[in-house]
Amino acid sequence: HAKRAFMEQVCFYDSEIGTNMRDQRHLAEALKLALQNDDLELHYQVQKSLSQNLEILGFEALLRWQHPKLGPISPEIFIPVAEENGLIFSLGEWVLRSACVDAVTWDPHLKIAVNVSAVQLMDPNLPHLVHTVLVETGLSPNRLELELTETALMKDRMQSLHIMRQIRSLGVGIALDDFGTGYSSLEILHAFSFDKIKIDKSFVHDIEDDRKSLAIVRAVLALGKSLDIPVLAEGIETHNQVSILRAEGCDEGQGFLLGRPSSLKELIWQDNLKSNPPINESKLA
Ligand code: C2E
Ligand code: MG
Ligand code: MG
Ligand code: MG
């Protein structure tokens, strides 16, 4: 019910605010203030091993913004606004630094995944920024993974390739996010090197009753195997999806069933940030 209400809200913003230039400008201004006033927060969603008995591997940082009047606004709405007016650079830097500051306090085997937008990827200074933040925070590079989408990489292939190589040479991993939703998924896999493939949640969602979705998931898993890239399934919501994905040999999973995005406080409270607690399958939901 809460989810439906949330979706309705998102759709409302999408049609009302998204198309209205004045509101667009209002959002941009409000977002700038939010960044200055520290009204933004990172939530973290757990990523678990499907093969290794649901061991916690790390967390994905997801940006949250509580607008003083409008309430929570989805990143699907405000990230494009930030990309449009250039605020994404300072916003992205804030996200990267905050995520590393938080992650360095966790058990050292836990990784942190940070989303990077298409516009950030066009910034030739990005590798230097990543390096600086790692040095400043003391986070070991192999604990950081940047999530990029196909669409972001295709904006300027040469530039993306160049920036991505520099980032990987720091020892930072690159995950291909929302795999299968772009226009040139296979070409992307061919041209770039990834440390992880994240199957988009739309395929996982339908895996139980749509043969086509299952076939696509199988094909991605086979690709991952033969390219030697671990595959993570996004948007896992049911036990049945876990069983199917496991049977198909999917390495890792993320989704509401395994854990909702939570504040750092909640995670500390749940005691999820220490060295591997033995995971009890019956505690799954
Ligand atoms: P994403 O990177 O693909 O993140 C996964 C999205 O799926 C998140 O939405 C997450 O809350 C949602 N999700 C997780 N598990 C489930 C599930 O089981 N079912 C369903 N239906 N959804 C699930 P969220 O937090 O609203 O973020 C949406 C998108 O906004 C992200 O997609 C990412 O592209 C972007 N985003 C979020 N935070 C940042 C950020 O810090 N920087 C940038 N550049 N983009 C961000
Ligand atoms: Mg992501
Ligand atoms: Mg995704
Ligand atoms: Mg997405």
Image (cartoon, grey):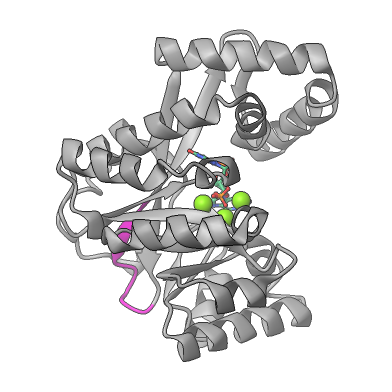
Question: Is residue 57 highlighted in magenta?
Answer: yes
Residue 37 coordinates in the image, percent (x, y): 42, 10
Q: Is residue 255 left or right of residue 47?
A: right
Residue 282 coordinates in the image, percent (x, y): 37, 65
210 and 23: which is toward the camera:
23
Q: Residue at x 42, y 37 (%)?
A: 43
Q: Is residue 30 above or below residue 49?
A: above
* Quarter of the image that includes the C terminus: bottom left
Q: Residue at x 46, y 17 (%)?
A: 35
Question: Is residue 23 highlighted in magenta?
Answer: no
Residue 18 coordinates in the image, percent (x, y): 79, 26
166 and 269: which is toward the camera:
166
268 and 65: which is toward the camera:
65
Q: Quadrant of residue 154?
A: bottom right
Q: Can residue 223 be spotted in the picture?
A: yes
Q: Residue at x 46, y 62 (%)?
A: 175
Q: Is residue 274 left or right of residue 145?
A: left
Q: Is residue 183 above or below residue 4?
A: below
Task: Point out the stretch of residues depicted in magenta.
Answer: 51-59
